[in-house]
Image (spheres, rainbow, N blue to C red):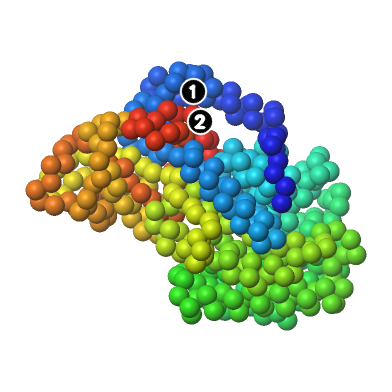
Amino acid sequence: MTTRSEPTLDGQAVQAMAAERLSVLDKALPASAAGLTTAEFLATGPRLSSFMTPVMTLDDSALEANVAAMAQWCADRGVELAPHGKTTMSPVLWDRQIRSGAWGVTLATASQVRVGVHFGVRRIQLANALVDPGALHWLAQAMTEHPDLEVLTWADSPGTIDAMERALTDVPVPRPIPVLVELGAAGGRTGARTVEEATAVAERIAASPVLRVAGVSGYEGALAHDSSAQSLARVRTYLQDMAALHDRIETAGHYPPDGAVYVTAGGSAYFDVVAEVLAPLAGGRTHVVVRAGAATIHDDGFYTGITPFTRDPEHHYQLRSAMHTWARVVSRPEPGLALLDAGKRDVPFDEGLPVPQLVAAELGAPARPLADATITAVNDQHAFLRISPDSDLRVGDVVRLGLSHPCTAFDKWRWIPVLAGDSDDPPVVDLIRTYF
């Protein structure tokens, strides 16, 4: 892996993003930001206390440390990183990852790929089948406009290839579109269910005039949801099948004689097992690519409990949550209960409810730990905070919440302030724009 010191995004696209005017319609931003560009707003020296609640924030030092830890882990194991950009849909954060050595960015839909291409990402893995005719026409045009653009797509059946070829009939394709053969497993998500079926897909791609076999892909996260020995064994067996598929395709001569070959797996829960099983395949033109997207942000919930770094006995690598949401107490209707002004529209809840961590009299005021408190439910715009009956929590107090699952946290926010330093009222050093 090489470390890039210069920004990798398209300069004009970044300038256009920076020139976008903030508005009173933007959630949580202070009224004083209305009409300003992000640069103009940041020049006013805003701090956490400038914002309205609820507000989701990012910790700049945690972002940098997490990006560096993941880059070092990949380098130490000889694998590449294509972090899943759907987690944040933030080109600025993608750029941080690429500058730290990431191969490129993984995305999940054609619309997300358009965002990536617009902002100058030139190596993209689309972790999905691409069979929409309009999207394929757009991709062919984008490949013509950008000779250095490489978008890898997935296919798990000959029917996928049939659909792609139908859509590309009479459409100029400047070079064959690289397609990864997706292997699945019984009870999983997409993907051919056997190595034999997947090999037939590779044979079909190799015969296509507009496609080429670019490697093997899979998603082990659909097969397990914890770090028990049984789950790890199931993941390991699946990855061994992926390696066997790669060997079959290579032996059968379905890979083109030149060009890179990719073997890719690895969400944010089992990338250690991916490296254990698949890293030996790396070498020559074969690249082993993991796609961990949540590691940059991490969390205080699901990924804290399952990240492979907790399985490292020597704790060489560490991640810490870079995201929190601040919510205000708006009601104390009965002893032992407080209602906060953050709900399903503001915080993730699919992989565990938020965790109360700190409380302050006001946003940016000195905070103290909030003990014996639990979020038990969230409505659209409220969170139920259960506390001890004699708690002195008051209406107007502000609670910092730890969050679980960044993939369903970022999609609730258009602008996210990035905080620097560890003061009670840290300065805002950036505003992260998302494109969901």
Secondary element under disc 2, as helix, strand or loop, is strand
Looking at this view, is 93 or 135 the one in front? 93
Residue at the spot of label 1: 42
Q: Is residue 412 left or right of residue 379?
A: right
| Amino acid on which the number 1 mark rests in the picture | Leu
Q: Is residue 376 left or right of residue 30?
A: left
Real-space Cα distance between discs 1 and 2? 7 Å
Q: Is residue 46 visible?
A: yes
Q: Is residue 398 left or right of residue 214?
A: left
x and y percent of residue 422 in the render?
Answer: 39, 35
Looking at this view, is 164 or 119 the one in front? 119
The image shows residue 98, relative to residue 376, as above or below, that is above
Q: Residue at x 86, y 52 (%)?
A: 175
The image shows residue 226, relative to residue 32, as above or below, that is below
Residue at the spot of label 2: 430
x and y percent of residue 76 in the render?
Answer: 65, 59
x and y percent of residue 285 in the render?
Answer: 82, 61
